[in-house]
């Protein structure tokens, strides 16, 4: 029969043993050290100058002084001397200095392993529940990178479910962003958590925007709405080809062009201005008390709206000269230069026609 127990190495009382109380007390002393083990420190190397009766230290790899040669042992101060006990693998000890539980793994004292897989939930500064299985109560939450970057992924089972961020005030939702019921990224707002407005949606195929925060039509001037590129004007479409659909501008603001017949400017509101310098002509044809040029036809560089009559104006190109015209059509007008004097000098008159292109 062994004289010591296999696990705690406690001495057994032997048959016909004298002074059995010595053996019994030694076993009690060892139990007093290891049962409900609490140590003043772990990985200790230097014995305290004045230890307390029953004080226990878990020694490190290179203890000194009275602990020399006792690496990894438990050192207990009992009856004015140090007693040493070898810990067994799996022994637990409460570290009074760090306030943490430690476990002897056969080589060192380590913190107990913590389960991190398939937890029912986790509450940091608060409690979790069956819906909010991860709950955090703190002034801020930091998710930082490991390596070059960091992604926060919110996944849903299928297109009809929800994957979103919900922003609340006093536990009432007022803003939500994400995929709610489809695969279109949307931002929704609510005054009370019950009635929601789809403020902005981005089509998952084209990336184009819609929603109550965006212009609904070209004539939508609701304050605070975002202007659509095809409904508004900016540097990219201020100048270009003007167009209209049912009287509503659909192209650029200003269109400018030139032909062999002169220059023209069209505006998005339908106004058109045509200008030209006509053929230089003398005024030698008698017309009552005046003298005129021969008729000068002018085909407009851009036609006016069908059935419209543009206004014609201009000057004869020199003093004592002025223009006269017939009734113009939408494409042409004929003018004469009139002078109070007989003048054989060929001078180019300037002419302007103002009307509408739609």
Image: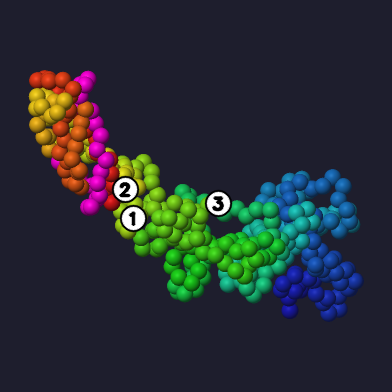
| Label number found at residue 231 | none
Q: Earlier in the sequence, mark 3 or mark 2?
A: 3
Looking at marks 1 and 3 on the same chain, the residue that comes earlier in the sequence is marked by: 3
Residue 311 appears left or right of 198: left
Q: Is residue 326 left or right of residue 30?
A: left
Left/right placement of residue 225 relative to residue 243 reads right
Name the chief secondary structure element in magenta.
loop
Say which mark, if any, is on residue 247.
1
* Distance between the alpha carbons at the discs numbered 3 and 2: 58 Å
* Residue linked to disc 3: 144
**Start-end of magenta stretch:** 299-321
Task: Determine whether label 2 and label 1 are within 8 Å by CB.
Answer: yes
Say which mark, if any, is on residue 270.
Answer: 2
**Residue 272: x, y in percent?**
28, 43
- Residue density around tag 1, few if under 14, some if 14–19, many if 20 or more, within 10 Å: few
Q: CA distance from mark 1 to mark 3?
A: 56 Å
Describe the element under mark 3 as helix, strand or loop.
loop
Q: Nearer the viewer, residue 240 or 139?
A: 240
């Amino acid at each position: 029969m062994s004289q010591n127990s296999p696990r705690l190495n406690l001495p057994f009382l032997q048959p016909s043993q004298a002074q059995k109380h010595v053996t019994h007390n030694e076993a009690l002393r060892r139990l007093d050290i290891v049962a409900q083990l609490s140590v003043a420190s772990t990985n200790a190397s230097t014995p305290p100058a004045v230890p307390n009766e029953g004080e226990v230290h878990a020694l490190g790899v290179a203890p000194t002084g009275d602990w020399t040669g006792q690496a990894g042992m438990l050192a207990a101060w009992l009856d004015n001397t140090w007693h040493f006990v070898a810990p067994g693998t799996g022994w637990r000890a409460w570290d009074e200095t760090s306030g943490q539980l430690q476990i002897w793994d056969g080589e060192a004292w380590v913190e107990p392993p913590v389960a991190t897989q398939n937890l029912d939930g986790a509450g940091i500064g608060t409690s979790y529940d069956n819906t909010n299985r991860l709950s955090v109560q703190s002034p801020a939450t930091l998710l930082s990178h490991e390596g070059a970057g960091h992604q926060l992924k919110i996944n849903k089972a299928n297109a009809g479910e929800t994957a979103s961020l919900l922003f609340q005030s006093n536990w009432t939702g007022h803003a939500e962003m994400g995929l709610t019921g489809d695969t279109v990224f949307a931002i929704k707002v609510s005054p009370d958590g019950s009635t929601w407005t789809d403020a902005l949606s981005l089509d998952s195929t084209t990336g184009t925007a819609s929603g109550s925060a965006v212009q609904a039509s070209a004539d939508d001037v609701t304050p605070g709405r975002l202007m659509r590129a095809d409904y508004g004007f900016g540097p990219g479409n201020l100048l270009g080809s003007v167009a209209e659909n049912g009287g509503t501008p659909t192209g650029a603001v200003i269109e400018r062009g030139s032909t062999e017949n002169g220059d023209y400017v069209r505006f998005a509101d339908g106004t058109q201005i045509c200008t030209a310098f006509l053929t230089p002509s003398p005024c030698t044809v008698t017309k009552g008390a005046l003298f005129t040029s021969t008729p000068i036809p002018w085909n407009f560089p851009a036609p006016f709206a069908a059935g419209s009559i543009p206004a014609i104006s201009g000057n004869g190109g020199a003093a004592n000269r002025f223009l006269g015209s017939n009734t113009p059509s939408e494409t042409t007008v004929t003018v004469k230069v009139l002078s109070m004097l007989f003048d054989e000098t060929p001078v180019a008159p300037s002419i302007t026609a103002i009307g509408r292109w739609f």
